[in-house]
Image (spheres, helix red, strand yellow):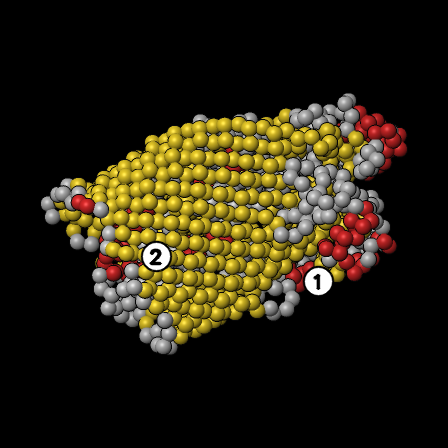
Amino acid sequence: MVGASVVAMGATGHVAYAQDDTDTEQSSNATDSDNEIVVTGIRASLQQAMNIKRDAQGVVDAISAEDIGKFPDTNLAESLQRITGVSIDRQNGEGSKVTVRGFGPDFNLVLLNGRQMPASGLGSCCEAPASRSFDFANLASEGIAGVEVYKSGRVSLPTGGIGSTINIKLPMPLDRPGLQGSFSAKAVYDTGLFSGTDITPEVSGIISKTFADDTLGVLVAGSYQKRKASLAQFNAGWREGYLGSDSSSWGSLPADANDWRGFRVENHPGPNDTYQTTQNAGYDFTDIDRERFNGQAVLQWRPSDDLAVAIDYEFSQNTLKARTSSIGVWFNHASTSSSWTDGPAAGPNFYAEDFGPGKDLAVTGAIAANRNINNSIGGNIQWDGFSGLHLEIDGHHSTAESKPTTPYGSNIAVGSAIFGVMNQRVDYTTAMPVISVNMYPGSEIDASNIRPAGNAFRNAYMKDTIDEVAFKGRFDIDESFIQSLDFGVVETRNKVRSAYGFIQTDSWGGTLGAADTPDDLYTMVNLPHDLAGMAGSQSSSIIPSYFRVNTVDLINLLENEVNICSAPWTGSAIPGTCLAEFQADRRIKEETTSFYVQSTHKFYWGMAPINFRFGVRFEDTRVVSSALVPIPTGTSWVGDNEIAILYGGGSDFQTLKGSYENFLPAADFDIEPVDNLIFRASYSQTITRPDYNSLQGGTTLAAPIRVGGSTGASGNPGLLPYKSNNIDLSAEWYYGPSSYVSVGFFNKNVKNFIANNTVKTTAFDLTNPAIGPRVAEAQAALGAGATTTDIRNWIKANYSQFVDAASGGILGQPDDPFVDFNITSPINSDQKARLWGWEFAVQHSFWETGFGAILNYTIVNSDTAYDNTIPAFTTPGQFAVNGVSDSANAVLFYDKDGLQARVAYNWRDKFLSGYGTDPFYIEAYGQVDVSASYEFGNGFSVFAEGINVTNEDRRGHMRNKQTVFFAAPGYARYAAGVRYTF
């Protein structure tokens, strides 16, 4: 289902005024006026959708349940991508977050029954969570009545979505009198499993019953879903973008044959070309076990025609267990060889390095079981008073919490290694980059040669709590010009806690000997078999095997032998666990008071009806941000390219405040000059609030430090929200009972962008022992051919007083140069961006054949773009809007005589997904999904569905298409089941 499909099963019960849409009320009256016929299925849903789109003021699209308990897709995000202008981000093979008209997940606000919802997640591996984006993977689709996407701003809705405001609508019992229900069960099989053919269950049920002459209603719904999947992926880390003329920076290419590293470079990038060298590369193999519970309960009471009361509760819990085993290589950028494409942004054909004895082949194990929990309880009272006065009080308390459920943390890496790489190479000329290694004799890729090495246990936590009370009213005037006057006041309190800590033992040179490490901790697995699906994965030169690591037993062994959790080199853990104590603990409070008023008008120009709505919303927001961060005391050079940050247990707590006000107008106009032809125009101002990381106080540093430096971040709670001036124009022709053609134009001028320009500076007087005077002395003593390992050993032998007894690392000294940190400190810049584009949509039913088609295409343009030819750390930094790309959908469906079938294709063009010193692009991706069902006429139906049936793969690259940072083969997922509806 795509395009303008809307709720077939009503869910307007206690949110009619919250949405405050004349069009919604008109549609509801149209569908409820005749209760003798109940229409379900694809065609009925599309027809109602078309009516909503036609009657709307402003730009509104939606997806509907085709019947009670029956949503078009298994995932809300997968359904939303069918809407014109909506694209999705996928995680673990499932839709997760949405981009609307080029604006990514943080720029879209999610509501539940018209109420602002909290959002939480555990973010990236190595910092406190910071995103406001809502993860649709937490919600099963079976308990959803519909999802509405408001693309033009309106003053009666909560603010926060420049891209869109997305309202998830839950079913209400009084909307379907009597006893109604649906139960379904299905079996799911993921074809990408590394081994076995595990089939997992999904069950759901919803039941609604009304009593006392349909004045009292109760609805209960629940679902349980389990999924097993396997994911294989190539990952690479890259040095920052250099100029071809740079041969002195760590990781840069040698300039000529006189360079101490030698010169084996084919087609060296030109002096003004940019390029990046590989820092690390590896293959990750992850087994996933996802378990999702959803539940909801609603009590509705309508004692009289002018009074309605509702209480509702919603719950979701999504637990993702993952076990990852990795094998990979790290580069020291010494004796390298490489080949390059032409510039101006050159990419590697291959990048390789030779080593003396002792270089590691990394073997890593990781486990996680992270859980997202969402709760929302709300109440609503509506009263239809005298003389057209309608009043409503609505309130809710909602929480979103994300946390690990294991004693190890939210993201861990337990390293092992085979110390014997003779040379290594990464070939980037195939879709799947090929990593190859040659080992020294006696160091073959075998479990008997593996030794434990360094490890890191990262512990993140986030909780978002929203308490909101709204008083709203509408006065129906019904005069010849003024139809109604709406007003409201809303108090919203958003309280966020985001925390992060880590413990780390930087023993990357190895701890236990291979003979002291049980071989059965590492099970050898055929690597090409589990990586199959992309060109290059079956190369004869690829690493032939990886090891499935028994990470839990390895952790227990290392804790017993070397105390990796009870006495780590960096940080401290909660006693008896490997859960790091929080080193960064951030508390943010946002309190917003909002007032709005709007008027709705209807008049005629000749015989052509005209609708006009105008309103303004005023908001006053106060921000209080507190942050607790650790204070570093020193550094320790613990590996060839790893410098640990040492902490003495001290911390600093800081509280900062900020505030801002906004007046946000909105106006909608439409005219129908001839029957079935409608022209629309809308203007609005909308905002999106800064991410929580930008609002935090204090400074945090990334660890470990690399020889060339590190990164860090600080925040600013005084930031203003992004603000956009929006114009929407559209023309729509409704030429059949369920057929239409539409074209729309949108323009958004956005200001108050947050500039995260990277500034190179020092922090806490930390020094870099890897480039200090003792390194220079060692190089002079050992000669030009000395390796980094040789240099470190020389310093340890000659300056034993500078060796850390705990880690064996070389301590930073006052005469060492300061560490260069690339610190980002956000401010509202004077940067502005314009995004504009076109939306084309066709929905056509082929008469009474049962066949139909939906086609849409969205063009998104921006006056910003990342320039791949500008090197990293150029001042001022670059500015570009993430997520801008074209997208398209094509759906062919059949719905007649109880048989429904659908083939859907969704495509999104290449887009910039993010940038810091360098850009990250996600390559164009298209996916085909299919589904079919047959209803036997007695309430029973059977159904089947397939996701990504053509096994489409995904890739991402940086400045050049061969600067690949990830590549993942895609696999189909199939399901079949039975449903009973009554």
In the figure, residue 683 lies in which quadrant? top left
Q: Residue at x 72, y 55 (%)?
A: 552
Q: Residue at x 81, y 59 (%)?
A: 519
Q: Position of residue 259 (x, y in %)?
A: 75, 32
Q: Position of residue 269 (x, y in %)?
A: 63, 37
Residues at marks 1 and 2 touching, judged by CB atoms closer than 8 Å: no
The image shows residue 126, relative to residue 449, as above or below, that is above
Q: How many marks?
A: 2
- Disc 2 target residue: 300
The image shows residue 28, relative to residue 204, as above or below, that is above
Quarter of the picture holding the C terminus: bottom left
Q: Residue at x 73, y 27 (%)?
A: 767
- Disc 1 target residue: 526
Q: Position of residue 795 (x, y in %)?
A: 85, 31
Residue 267: which disc?
Answer: none
Q: Please identify, in this view, whether the residue under mark 1 or under mark 2 is nearer the observer.
A: 2
Any part of residue 359 in sight: no
Q: Secondary structure at mark 1?
A: strand
The answer to which of 301 and 59 lies nearer the viewer is 301
Amino acid type of the residue that numbered disc 2 sits on in the rendered structure: Gln
Any part of residue 601 in sight: yes
